[in-house]
Amino acid sequence: MGTSLLVGVPLVAAVTPCHAQEASPPEEVSSPASPVVDYFANWFERVAKTQAEQPHWVTPLVTVTARLEQEFRYDQIWQSRPHGDALYSFGGGKGLELIPTEHTEVILGIPAYQFRKHDTKETNGFADENLLLKYRLLAANEDHGNYIVTAFMGLTLPTGSEHNTQDETIFTPTLAFGKGWGDFDVQATLGASIPANAVGNLGTPILANAALQYRILRFLWPEVEVNTTYWPNGEREGKQQTFITPGLVIGKIPIWRRLGATVGAGYQEAFSSHPV
């Protein structure tokens, strides 16, 4: 049970307009353009084209969106715990999100710093490193169907401190999808967390998330999210953990050229038939 706050700011850089070049004198031979230079020079045009082909919803608080995004995201999480204790997560494992090609996105997470209110300093520290690759399979913007389907492959590396790590490399294949009807949209994911070793201890939990959003005016997106984890095996076999998160996301608020900001907050409550 707790609350979470996120702020996302898309990356921005000015793109130099193209101008016709003056003809070179006959004795001069223009050198061919470098593919590497062209790749980076056309970065933002490529990103704009990619995002124009998909729905323009906002990213939910918890559920990872199927949309391809280019932004820097920071999450702040406060979680109440038994006996008056509390857990604070700075960063939430989010970080830099880039669109390197028309159908892909990479997320380079920044390990969250975990701080416990009543525990000793030895239990505080950084969590594991998270990386994510998205490949967009299908997409149509609001004028052509308003839907999207994307495949994910997540990777968690055991880089965290002693009390903040899973101690295992974990792969998380996921299928994400979304559909919109006017100002209403549903975004959802279904995946599994697969440790490279020690499956018998950690198991292979099934992860399901869904977010229901409705846009009011231009920038307000009230939402309700349901996030469920079920353990079919491992030490937690048969247990289920479900959270419901009502929240509000505001964005994308234009700032300057491509620069914009999105901010959201929500309250997460645990509802579990077989709690962890």
Image (cartoon, rainbow, N blue to C red):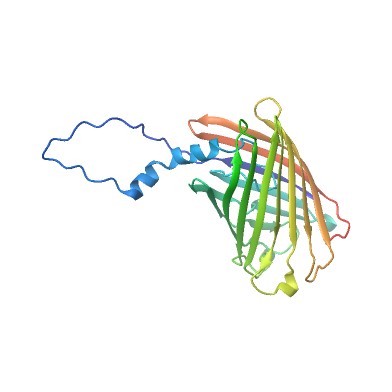
Reply above or below: 264 against 36: above
Which residue occupies the extreme right position in the image? Answer: 273
Which residue does the image show at 48% across and 31% down from the upper left?
257
Reply above or below: 270 against 262: below
Q: Nearer the viewer, residue 133 or 249?
A: 133
- Residue 271, how many percent across, how many down? 85, 51
Which residue occupies the extreme left position in the image? Answer: 27
Which residue does the image show at 40% across and 41% down from the upper left?
42
Reply above or below: 93 against 159: above
**Going by the image, does 126 lie left or right of 17?**
right
**Going by the image, does 266 lie left or right of 83?**
left
Reply above or below: 172 against 263: below
Q: Nearer the viewer, residue 86 or 45?
A: 45
Which residue occupies the extreme front position in the image? Answer: 144
**Going by the image, does 195 lie left or right of 50?**
right
- Residue 25, how many percent across, how many down? 13, 35
- Residue 259, how many percent across, how many down? 51, 35
In which quarter of the view is residue 203 placed? Answer: bottom right
Which residue occupies the extreme top position in the image? Answer: 217
Which quadrant of the figure contains the C terminus?
A: bottom right
Callout count: 0
- Residue 165, how many percent across, how many down? 66, 66
In which quarter of the view is residue 218 placed? Answer: top right
Q: Nearer the viewer, residue 253 or 186?
A: 186
Q: Nearer the viewer, residue 78 or 147?
A: 147
**Going by the image, does 51 lie left or right of 82?**
left
In which quarter of the view is residue 115 placed? Answer: bottom right
Which residue does the image show at 65% across and 45% down from the upper left?
65
